[in-house]
Image (cartoon, helix red, strand yellow):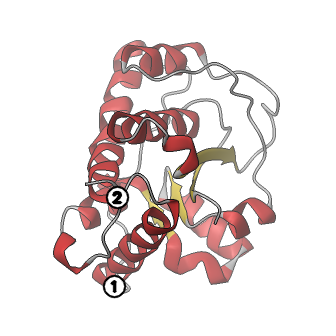
């Protein structure tokens, strides 16, 4: 079975979504060294202006400061098949959520604004999830799917809150990137902990 795949989406795919991609990857690796076989964390942007570019330097600094790696990253434009392949889609903003759902209406149940998903994950009862083992990719995948289903049920057709959006830090200082990095980790770390107890 393929790894549980998380797709992070922002606008240009050089700041927020690559930070989320690499910080989720790091959070999973903290829990399981063979994380690449268990969870695939990828990203894309709704626009293709930066396609092929490296991560924005302040974003890369934040990833390194948090023991992640920006190496090997190349920005890419969102395509429908990326959405089809993802078990969970996390957008930086509600506008990007709307973009994803307009492109793939059937993805609505597994698409969340990042901050919204973080709020919902905090309310999931882990005793109702299937067991997961870092030695069993199928079990991790099943648990990941169950987490997404539980979050969708908790959402109960309510819209994301304005505070769930990640500010666009592009062109702003390291302090803004640091705050955005903190907000990303407020979701990625608890999710990784719930996925790989």
Mark 1 or mark 2, earlier in chain: 1
* Crowdedness near tag 1: few (<14), some (14–19) or many (≥20) residues, C-alpha within 10 Å: few
The quadrant the C terminus occupies is bottom left
Say whether residue 12 is left or right of residue 124.
right
In this picture, residue 73 sits left or right of residue 167 = right
Per the image, label 1 sits on a secondary structure element best described as: helix
Judging from the image, what secondary structure is the residue with disc 2 in?
A: helix
Query: 179 above or below 148?
Result: above
Which residue shows up at 81% across the image and 41% down it? 48
The residue singled out by tag 2 in the image is 195
The x, y position of residue 58, in whole percent, is: 51, 15
Question: Is any part of residue 29 visible from this angle?
Answer: yes
Decide if residue 125 is in sight here: no
Does 39 sit left or right of 184 as displayed? Answer: right
Q: Give coordinates of residue 174: x percent, y percent.
A: 40, 14
Q: Which residue is mark 1?
A: 153
Q: Foreground mark, 1 or 2?
A: 2
Identified at 78% across, 46% down, the residue is 77
Q: Position of residue 196 (x, y in %)?
A: 32, 54
Residue 24: percent from left, percent from top: 44, 41
Q: 99 or 8: nearer the eye?
A: 8
Residues 58 and 173: in front is 58
Q: Quadrant of residue 1?
A: bottom right
């Amino acid at each position: 079975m393929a790894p549980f795949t998380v797709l992070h989406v922002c606008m240009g795919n050089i700041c927020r979504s690559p930070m989320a991609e690499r910080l989720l990857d790091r959070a999973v690796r903290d829990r399981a060294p063979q994380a690449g076989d268990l969870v695939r964390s990828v990203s894309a942007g709704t626009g293709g202006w930066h396609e092929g570019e490296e991560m924005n330097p302040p974003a890369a600094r934040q990833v390194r400061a948090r023991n992640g790696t920006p190496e090997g990253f190349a920005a890419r434009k969102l395509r429908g098949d990326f959405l089809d392949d993802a078990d969970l889609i996390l957008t930086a903003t509600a506008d990007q959520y709307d973009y994803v759902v307009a492109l793939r209406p059937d993805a609505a149940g597994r698409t969340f604004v990042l901050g919204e998903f973080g709020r919902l994950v905090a309310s999931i009862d882990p005793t109702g999830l299937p067991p997961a083992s870092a030695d069993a990719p199928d079990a991790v995948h099943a648990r990941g799917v169950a987490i997404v289903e539980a979050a969708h049920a908790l959402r109960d057709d309510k819209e994301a809150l304005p505070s769930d959006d990640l500010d666009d830090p592009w062109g702003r200082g390291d302090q803004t990137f640091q705050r955005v990095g903190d907000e990303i980790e407020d979701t990625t770390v608890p999710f990784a902990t719930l996925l790989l107890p």
